Image (spheres, coloured by chain):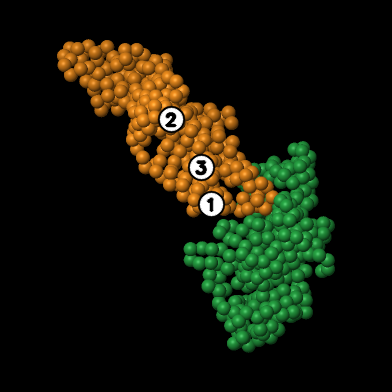
Chain colours: A orange, B green
């Protein structure tokens, strides 16, 4: 167990290093950071001065050694856009993103389990058709449109909830629902098909033949066996959201999250802020994956921590 | 066998409505099992023997439905007994022990779950009882087995575990649906010996579903032969094997290799069973029967034989005498 964790942490560290290195190379070779950061009207002297201030005039290998050194000291440089340490900007936005993702994915997970289980009870039945139909509708509606619809409906026509921004718990409702819709639909369809598969397996018949109550067989036996693919997909949805797929929701609802700041940093050519964001996201994704492996092991004893 | 039967099934009919039409899987099946008795149901795949058992257990797979007949437990319909007859007084073991246990739970957890549900035992007591049950089905190191998962054990051991789990409910009847089909021959013999020992010790009734006539001969008291969803012949095992009356039974016995007749080639019954979607009118076997005649186009009434009954117009005739091996 400890050996497994250590190994995965080292692997994760290498992944994060690889990602930061890639970002370093891409930003410095495939684009000129100075051109991105300074206005078009800047004179050649100003550009040279700026480049030497940031150390961008030195050879690439030297720059990389310096960059790696700063990384080790957890120094991500200063955001050229906000004029303060890049990591400070990231850490300020990160909790907002985690709150939105937690509420949205939490909602999707909590609702998809009963919906999928109910649908699987009678394949082709009324309930199954309703759940499957709604899921397909949810999957096919673009997020920005759903967000706008919800705003029109629940903030403008019926002024129940705030249209945008962050503050009270009420502010969280619409963005979370919008974010939840697609993962909910995907997870529900998965739970449904997995449960249908499990319910047809001989061990379910045996459990019923042993006289165990239906509900117990459903949750204690079938659902538990359907949990690994469910967790895999849920983990993937989480990674997707962390990687910035929340940006549409953040834009529609003016939610001050990481996705939004990442887009803005890219648009403004804020090299150091982009690097800091990518670094934090990479670390989070690595951690999520290690956590998932541990949960898998917990659910299925046949899975070894190899 | 005398006395009131534990389980009696009368004129059972089961259908599976499908898009292509109604599949009549079980037609007018009647049988009875008394305490201490082993009734064998033999038949080819698709003859309706497993569906009959599933109907008795109330575990028909969708879209299967019982549309006729009655199933009585100790003289009364299941509803009159309340919940808990199926799975408590009637236990089952199935064909594939490797697939019949939850792969994510230890043997012990599944035994304890069953025991606690039926006997309302405490955790500790249930675990002790689980170990006792494993010892009863002749498993070595029962306490250690409790903490093992199904994937760590072999098919033979798992079938013993299945038996222990069946015994956990203190059943009066065990329905064994092809219990040894998935096992090695030597393991088969062990499981069958165990089954008949448990029957002697506990006075269990057993409903044994199989396609293996050797198992029937070794274990059963009476046997019912099923073909195309119908029982075509019943009788006491010895009498029925000595003097099979139905051409299908005769054909089955002829197709069974024996030690005495080593040099002969194996024979089979030509043709295939009819599709149950469009069953032929009259006797279902007439399409393959060597002595089918005019009257066979209508279904005969059951006729008494020495120890049971037969459904055939030409019962008792040597149907295969002129057919070369």
- Check disc 2: other Cα within 10 Å, few if <14, some if 14-19, many if 20+: many
Q: Chain of mark 2?
A: A
- Check disc 3: other Cα within 10 Å, few if <14, some if 14-19, many if 20+: many
Question: Do callouts 3 and 1 mark residues in contact (Cβ within 8 Å)?
Answer: no
- Check disc 1: other Cα within 10 Å, few if <14, some if 14-19, many if 20+: some
Distance CA(mark 2)–CA(mark 1): 31 Å
Q: Secondary structure at mark 2?
A: helix
Q: How many marks?
A: 3
State left or right for residue A93 relative to residue B23. Answer: left
Q: Report the quarter where the C terminus of chain A lies.
A: top right
Query: Quick one: A136 or B114, which is closer to the camera?
Result: A136
Residue A176, numbered circle: 2
x and y, in percent, of residue B66 in the image: 62, 62
Q: Chain of mark 3?
A: A
Q: Chain of mark 1?
A: A
At 27% from the left and 12% from the top, the residue drawn is A53
Asked if labels 3 and 1 share a chain, the reply is: yes
- Residue A189 visible here: yes
- Tag 1 or tag 3, which sits nearer the N-term? 3
Residue under pointer 3: A115
Task: State which quadrant residue B26 falls in.
Answer: bottom right
Residue under pointer 1: A122
């Amino acid at each position: 167990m400890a050996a497994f964790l250590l190994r995965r942490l080292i692997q994760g560290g290498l992944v994060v290093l690889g990602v930061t290195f890639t970002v370093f190379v891409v930003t410095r070779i495939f684009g000129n950071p100075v051109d991105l950061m300074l206005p078009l009207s800047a004179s050649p002297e100003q550009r040279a001065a700026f480049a030497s201030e940031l150390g961008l005039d030195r050879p690439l290998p030297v720059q990389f050694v310096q960059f790696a050194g700063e990384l080790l000291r957890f120094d991500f440089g200063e955001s050229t856009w906000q004029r303060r340490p890049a990591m400070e900007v990231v850490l300020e936005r990160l909790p907002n993103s985690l709150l939105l993702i937690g509420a949205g994915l939490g909602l999707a997970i909590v609702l998809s389990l009963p919906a999928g289980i109910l649908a699987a009870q009678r394949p082709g039945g009324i309930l199954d058709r309703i759940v499957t139909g709604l899921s397909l509708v949810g999957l096919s509606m673009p997020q920005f449109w759903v967000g706008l619809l919800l705003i029109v409906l629940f903030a403008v026509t019926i002024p129940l909830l705030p249209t945008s921004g962050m503050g009270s718990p009420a502010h969280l409702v619409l963005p979370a629902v919008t974010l939840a819709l697609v993962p909910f639909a995907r997870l529900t369809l998965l739970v449904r098909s997995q449960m249908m598969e499990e319910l047809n397996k001989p061990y379910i018949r045996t459990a019923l033949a042993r006289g165990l109550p239906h509900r117990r067989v459903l949750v204690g036996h079938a659902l538990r066996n359907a949990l690994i693919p469910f967790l895999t997909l849920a983990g993937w949805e989480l990674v997707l959201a962390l990687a910035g797929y929340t940006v549409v929701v953040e834009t529609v609802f003016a939610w001050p999250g990481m996705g939004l700041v990442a887009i803005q940093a890219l648009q403004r050519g804020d090299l150091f802020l982009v690097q800091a964001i990518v670094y934090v996201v990479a670390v989070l994704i690595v951690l999520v994956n290690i956590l998932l492996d541990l949960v898998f092991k917990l659910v299925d004893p046949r899975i070894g921590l190899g | 066998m005398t006395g009131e039967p534990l389980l009696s099934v009368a004129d059972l009919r089961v259908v599976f409505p499908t898009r292509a039409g109604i599949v009549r899987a079980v037609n007018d099946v009647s049988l009875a099992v008394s305490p201490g008795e082993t009734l064998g149901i033999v038949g080819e795949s698709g003859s309706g023997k497993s569906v009959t058992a599933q109907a008795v257990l109330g575990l028909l797979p969708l879209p299967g439905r019982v549309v006729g007949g009655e199933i009585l437990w100790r003289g009364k319909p299941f509803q009159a007994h309340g919940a808990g007859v199926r799975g408590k007084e009637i236990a089952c073991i199935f064909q594939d022990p490797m697939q019949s246990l939850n792969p994510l739970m230890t043997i012990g957890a599944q035994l304890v779950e069953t025991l606690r549900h039926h006997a309302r035992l405490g955790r500790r007591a249930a675990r002790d009882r689980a170990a006792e049950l494993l010892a009863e089905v002749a498993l070595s190191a029962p306490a250690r087995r409790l903490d093992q998962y199904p994937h760590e054990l072999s098919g033979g051991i798992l079938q013993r575990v299945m038996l222990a789990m069946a015994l956990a409910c203190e059943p009066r009847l065990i329905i064994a649906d092809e219990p040894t089909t998935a096992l090695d021959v030597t393991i088969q013999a062990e499981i069958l010996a165990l089954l008949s020992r448990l029957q002697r010790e506990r006075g269990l009734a057993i409903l044994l579903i199989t396609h293996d006539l050797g198992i029937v001969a070794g274990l059963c008291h009476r046997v019912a032969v099923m073909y195309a969803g119908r029982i075509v012949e019943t009788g006491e095992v010895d009498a029925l094997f000595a003097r099979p009356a139905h051409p299908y039974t005769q054909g089955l016995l002829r197709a069974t290799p024996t030690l005495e007749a080593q040099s002969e080639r194996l024979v089979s019954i030509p043709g295939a069973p009819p599709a149950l979607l469009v069953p032929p009118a009259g006797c279902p076997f007439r399409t393959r029967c060597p002595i089918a005649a005019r009257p066979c186009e209508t279904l005969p009434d059951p006729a008494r034989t020495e120890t049971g009954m037969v459904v055939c117009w030409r019962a008792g005739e040597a149907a295969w005498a002129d057919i070369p091996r």
